[in-house]
Amino acid sequence: MNSRLFSIIRKEFIQIIRDPRTLAMILVVPVMQLFLLGYAATTDVRNVPIAVWDQSRSPESRALLDAFRSADYFRIAYDIGSDAEVRDLIERGEARAALIIPPDYSQRLLEGDAQVAMILDGSDSTVGGTALSTARLIGQSHATKLMQEQAARTGRSAEFNPPLEVRTQVWYNPDLDSAYFMIPGVIGMILFAITSILTATTIVRERERGTIEQLIVTPIRSWELVVGKLMPYVILSLFDTLVVLAIGNLWFKVPVRGDLGLIIGTSGLLLLSGLGIGLFASTTANTQQEAFMTVWMTLLPAIFLSGFLFPIEAMPPVLRWVSSIIPLRYYLVIIRSLLLKGVGAAALQNEIIALAIFGVGIMGAAAMRFRKRLD
Amino acid sequence: MTEYLIQAQGLYKSFGENHAVNDLFLHIERGEIYGLVGSDGAGKTTTLRLLVGAMLPDAGMITIDGMDLFQHGEEIRARIGYLSQRFSLYEELSVLENIRFFAEVRGLSTEEWLPRSMDILEFVGLAGFKERRAGQLSGGMKQKLGLASALVHRPRILLLDEPTTGVDPVTRQDFWQLIIRLVSDERLTVLISTPYMDEAARCGRLGFLRDGSLLKSGTPAELRSALEGSILELRGEPLRELRLAAAMDKDILEVHAFGDRLHLRVATGKTEAVLNRLPDQLAGRGLKVEDVRIIPPTLEDVFISLTSSEIADA
């Protein structure tokens, strides 16, 4: 092995191990972020507090409330008795919705045209929207159940056929658990952010501290310096990939259906992009601060436009176009498909090629810019 | 014609509007200690950086050991040890790890680097600190470690950029003893930049840099004798008034305070006249003159006159 290269790699490893901040950035931050985002960045709606104004107080109304209770989505938090209370609880945000059962509910139910009112707080559109559709679903299934019971009682055929039924089937993530969607995204984001931030600062640090001047007078070649300095971060980032993947799988129960080799390989391509961006930033900056700011400014839009949180399909055409030059976007498609769908490389061909082109391109551009000189 | 070890011809280097090095010629002989002196911003650091190839000149030629620097950069760098102005070693690494790193990237093998490193650490007096982190060394020890790292590959030429700036006098003394030993025992050639005139006096030859070009060069004695005019030393009080009054004399070119006395540079041929009339003139203004006499010029006098002279601009 090239002994100069090996010396640089070893030196860099020693520096990383002895610098608590860098070490924490590599070992602690990814795990912490995974847990934070895995729990906090969930779009699942659960335990939404609702207020109930049951004016009927009948066995039938209690049956309806039981149906609401048995779904995880709602928590009946308040039992109230007036319009004013509904308004008050929703205004103060203590209840996100209110269910109002009219006094003649059981009577109307017998007549076949019972109605209940659901008032929703739409200020948080995610919670509001999910609560709305969930409430409808609960209502519908309860209604179907009631009809079947009624049919059974009156001796008519238990077969009840609505004129149209949409039968839905959810693939890959049948419970639509958002962790399945978020965790692969978090893996991509962590890898991308960590590699770009660390490489941006590590090369500038040599410049800032003046050590680059000593390196220049040695026979080290530019590529040896770049590769030698990046290699430890590649190794540690791949290690991070495996740790985050393992936690995602064992703790958050996100399946790993695809080929592990393919996952690591495509993650390597993303690392190339992250390292390239970091290296590029450090060739333009004079201080660690500057490099950090440059990376940060590219990182934020990259994350927002990557489809990590917001679906690319929903973006205006301009932003959709911008997102096509963001490597993280391709990786997210790849990693989500690999983990959840278990597809092979052929299905992801375009994304893999795009990621590779970006990675090699930015890395090449950065390496070309990097000169073993001070001016 | 002498064969020069380091030869720079017509070097230019600008940073935007700032002409850091401006038509510089430099000739350094094998086995000498050459001191590069000049005030801050005169171009000392840039000159050294150009000579090691850390920067590319805008124009000019550099030949080291008979080879063109731009064609044989790596071969030349293998013969050069360079210590930059700021301490630039890895603070997280121990003394020995630092030396090992620089030894290995310089191509020393596993069998070679350890004995060589220990020799060097012994030489600079850091053998007892080999396990200490570089970040925890004192300023003087850091400089010695820098010197050790620059020497690990047995260079024939040592370029030192203000190695003793910010270092205490005792360590400066130690440091110079090391350099003198390297030159006498190992026949190294040393190019050192320094803002201190007492250090300049230790050099075999000196070059005065101003505005990026070499104003004058020669041995300390040559430079002293080449000083235009002569130096009078004046003692008396109050010093401030004496200084103002002396500066008004048309034959006195410059007045500078050196502690409790003044150095007056007198135009060539006017020394006797000034010496005769000055005490009375000053006494006439009610100032007390204790002593006026001719002294041999110090390097500092030479430095000041070169730095402030207008003639050099012509």
Image (cartoon, grey):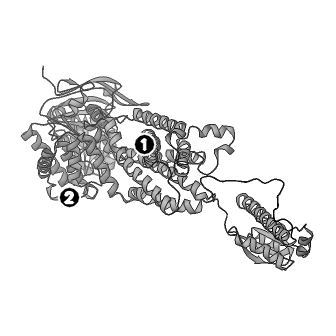
Q: Nearer the viewer, mark 2 or mark 1?
A: 2
The residue to which callout 2 is attached is B131
Q: Helix, strand or loop at disc 1?
A: loop
Identify the subunit bearing mark 1: A
Q: Position of residue A123 (x, y in %)?
A: 75, 60
- Name the amino acid, label 1: Asn
Tell which of B307 and B244 is nearer to you. B307
Left-right relation of A41 to B9: right
Tell which of B210 and A254 is nearer to you. A254
Q: Is residue A236 above or below residue B64?
A: below
Left-right relation of B150 to A146: left
In percent of the image, x 31 and y 45: which residue is there? A211
Q: Helix, strand or loop at disc 2?
A: loop
Q: Position of residue B293 (x, y in %)?
A: 18, 42
Q: Is residue B104 above or below residue A25?
A: above
Give how far apart the Cα atoms at labels 2 and 1 are.
31 Å
- Circle 2 residues within 10 Å: few <14, some 14–19, many ≥20: few
Identify the subunit bearing mark 2: B
Q: Position of residue B66 (x, y in %)?
A: 17, 23
Q: Are marks 2 and 1 in contact (CB under 8 Å)?
A: no
Q: Position of residue A313 (x, y in %)?
A: 67, 43
The N terminus of chain B: image quadrant? top left
The residue to which callout 1 is attached is A286
Q: Can residue A185 be seen here? A: yes
